[in-house]
Amino acid sequence: SVSRRLHTVLEKLLEGVAFQAPDIPERTIVIDAAYVDGRLSAIAGNDDLSRYIL
């Protein structure tokens, strides 16, 4: 389903931030295009991208 695929993409995108969040002081975290490209490059390198298309 679309929501499951979206959840997978968001989980991949935010896994580092979510894992570190309890240990870092309160601050603003900026998610920009470079961050997204870096975090999702493994998904983008996958030959079968159809499962991530919303």
Image (cartoon, rainbow, N blue to C red):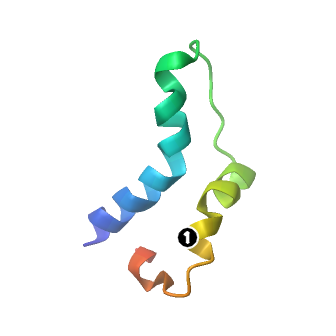
Residue 28: x and y, percent?
62, 24
Instruction: Give above or below for 4 relative to 29.
Output: below
- The residue depicted at 65 percent of the width and 66 percent of the height is 41
Residue at image mark 1: 43
- Residue 48 position, x and y percent, is 49, 86
Q: Position of residue 3 (x, y in %)?
A: 28, 63
- Does residue 35 sit above or below 20 in this rendering? below
Mark 1 surroundings within 10 Å by alpha-carbon count, few (fewer than 14), some (14 through 19), many (20 or more): some
Location of residue 54 (image quadrant): bottom left
Q: Is residue 52 left or right of residue 7?
A: right
The quadrant in which the N terminus is found is: bottom left
Residue found at x 55% / y 40%: 16
> Which residue is painted at 69% across and 56% down in the image?
38
Residue 17 image position (x, y, % from top left): 54, 35
Q: Residue at x 30, y 70 (%)?
A: 2
Residue 7 against residue 44 in the figure, above or below = above
- The furthest residue to the left: 1
Query: Looking at numbered disc 1 in the image, what kind of residue is underneath it?
Result: Ile
Q: How many marks?
A: 1
Identify which residue, 23 or 3, lies in the foreground.
Answer: 23
Secondary structure at badge 1 equals: helix
Q: Residue furthest top?
A: 25
Asked whether, in this view, residue 8 is left or right of residue 34, the answer is: left
Q: Residue furthest right?
A: 34
